[in-house]
Image (spheres, grey):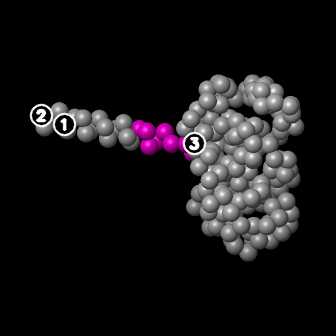
Amino acid sequence: MNKILIKVLIISFFIISFNATAEIKHIKEGNVDAKVKLIVFESLTCSHCADFHKNVYPSLKKDFIDNGLISIEFRNFPLDIAAFNAAKIAHCRNDGKSDILHELYKNQSSWVRGSTIEDLNKNLKRVVQESNFKLDFDKCISDSKIEDFILEDRIDGAKNYKIEATPTLIINDEKFENPKNYKKLKKYIEKLI
């Protein structure tokens, strides 16, 4: 009897360990050991967030991320169901990489249109297929683990950082105002390095 119990415990341990490694990953870039840690709370349907990815992020990447001076983590704060669905797509591979996220922002104007969620989903699905990410759109959209992960990000943002709008930058656990002004952001980060 004891041998059976031990075998059950060992099998249970491996199942629990496997499930723990299957946790959803945050999308991150840069040096994880960097002194400066930047978190961006964003919504994929937010035009200001798309502007951040187009106008601020490239300079941030060139000046700080690629040099290993900061790490950046993109967190979910969906403002509507279309943003929620797009966030599921961004996390669907669960590899922590940002390529899908950036592609969705780059093509935001081509999928964030329509009068119903069905229209938006149809446009989003087309963008995903044209981008050749080899994702099963319907499977990604219906993944409950990813849904929970995204909602936990949103709850954490509202509760712990008092997020009310997107994009909101958190730098070393402090809210940074005016995320659209790269000059101010750069000066702020340089003081922390």
Query: Residue type at mark 2?
Result: Met
Q: Which is in the foreground here, disc 1 or disc 3?
A: 3
Graded by Cα atoms within 10 Å as few (under 14), some (14 to 19) or many (20 or more), the crowding at tag 2 reads few
Tell me the magenta residue range. 18-26
Query: Residue type at mark 3?
Result: Asp
Residue placed under numbered mark 3 in the picture: 148
Label 3 secondary element: helix
Regarding residue 26, the answer to whether it shows in the image is: no
Q: Quadrant of residue 25?
A: top right
Q: Is residue 108 left or right of residue 68?
A: right
Distance (Cα) linking label 2 and label 1: 6 Å
Label 2 secondary element: loop
Distance (Cα) linking label 3 and label 2: 39 Å
Q: Work out whether 177 lies above or below 50.
A: below
Q: How many marks?
A: 3
| Residue 60 in picture, x, y percent from top left | 78, 58
| Residue 184 in picture, x, y percent from top left | 83, 69
Residue ID at (64%, 67%): 173
**Residue 101 lies in the magenta stretch:** no
Q: Is residue 47 left or right of residue 148?
A: right
Graded by Cα atoms within 10 Å as few (under 14), some (14 to 19) or many (20 or more), the crowding at tag 1 reads few
Query: Residue type at mark 1?
Result: Leu
Residue placed under numbered mark 2 in the picture: 1
Q: Are marks 2 and 1 in contact (CB under 8 Å)?
A: yes
